[in-house]
Image (cartoon, rainbow, N blue to C red):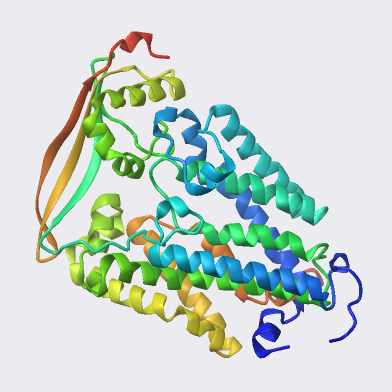
Amino acid sequence: MTRLSRWLFEPAPLARVALLRVAVYAFVVVDVLALHTSGWYHGFADPVWYQPLQAGRLLGLPAATVVLVEMLKWGSVGAALVAMTGRAPRTAGWAVALTWSWYQYVAFSYGKVDHDRGDFVVALLLLPTVGIAHLSDKRRSQAAGFALRAVQLGAIATYLLSGVAKLRFGGPGWVNSATLLRAVVRRGSPIGEVFAQVPFVLHAMQWVLMVAELTSWVIFFLPERWRRLMVLAWYLFHAVTYATITIAFWPHLVMLLAFLPLERYRDRLSARWRARHVTATAT
Amino acid sequence: MSVPTGSTRTASGPLSRAALAWRVAVTLGVVGLAVNGSVRGNDVQWPFAPMSQFAFGVDLEGQIRSTYVEADTTAGTTVRVPLTAGGVGLGRAEVEGQLPRFVADPALLESIAVAAARRHPEWPRYTRLRLRQEVSDLRGGEVVSTHTERLADWTVLDPAGLR
């Protein structure tokens, strides 16, 4: 095998995939029930506003109706709850992939497309391919390794391609334009208002963002420790973004978990909890 | 290559040659579509669309436009129509995405009054809708003044009959 395919198929613990699955499917439930993406309310929109995307034309998807959005909503929640148990990982997982992706399609076929959700479709399509994975199964599998790697690639491609799009549409001058000021003026938040008073901070943020996006692929060449710090840095960046323009790329945040040794974090947490519990009962 | 421990159903261990092959093929296909979408595609190609949110430059001496819809109601009040998740079936960015249609044919505003009545039967009905833009003028990347621009007006045909 070549170096590239060894890297792509580097075996990973099944427990890690099992934990990522719990996070991904739990997020689906939260996303559909609590975050209120536009998929649901398009059921109430006049069909005159439906603007089919290519995928919809290809598959002959109709304009949304209240019945359709309710089916997609509760279908994805139901399938995600089953998938969280780890049972029937393929059937349940692909049912989530189908219903949730269709729900996003409904959201994006009325005049606006969000770009942080395409990579999550990748995660939903790939997680079922690993098959049965128990939370305590420390065995390594190539199928698990590939699924995690592909999710990582999807997450980083989202950053890199965002940088590419800024160069394509905004040009190199994007970094010196007023794009973030526009976002703050239009969306407003108490912290954003403060930033609007000091435009040079927003200006600097644009430079940081462009550089971070265009160099995001470096993460694959870093030592493990630095890789985790970089993931932490991205989480901080998204927290600041949320505070200033109240936009969070939620599904993408879940994707970043694929970089972390989740099963080790869990073991460490439960060991610490047990230790504290033991000392508490002993005293 | 070592002998596979069985089908992919067994989960652990190495993958069979066929299982490796389809994964490589799908990866190449997805990468190809994503790159194509980013370099020369547009939104209709989602999920292989360019990541164009916040990708457009805004002129430091230009303007920032923020669209809103205002409505008079059967209760005699004037309200801001919520172009949000809890609102009337269309978000603000979606109204902006289809703005030329509203301007060319203000009668399309009627559909907003209909959607409001369907989703929120308890609200007073909209009688008159005004599509407006708040325009902020920039000088050197700072907001120096704002004014409102009128885009379209529509008088709802039969407010009491909306349902």
- Taking depth in this image into account, of B127 and A275 the one nearest to the observer is B127
Can you give x and y, in whole percent of width and height, for residue A12 in the image? 74, 78
Residue A178 percent across, percent down from the top left: 21, 64
Q: Which of these two is toward me, A150 or A207?
A: A150
* B40 displayed left or right of B31: left
Q: Nearer the viewer, residue A179 or B52?
A: B52
Viewed as shown, does residue B144 lie left or right of A47?
Answer: left
| Quadrant of residue A183 within the rendered picture | bottom left
Q: Is residue B78 left or right of residue B113?
A: left
For residue A173, which quarter of the picture?
bottom left
Q: State the quadrant of the N terminus of chain A.
A: bottom right
Q: Residue at left 70%, top 59%? A: A22
Which quadrant would the C terminus of chain A be assigned to in this image? bottom right
Residue located at (31% from left, 31% from top): B81
Residue A9 in view in this figure: yes
Q: Residue at x 75, y 74 (%)?
A: B20
Residue at the front extreme, as displayed? A58
Task: Give the percent coordinates (x, y) of residue B104.
Answer: 22, 31
Left or right: residue B50 versus residue B81 is right
Q: Is residue A80 visible?
A: no
On screen, residue B156 above or below A71: above
Q: How many marks?
A: 0
Q: Position of residue A256 (x, y in %)?
A: 56, 69
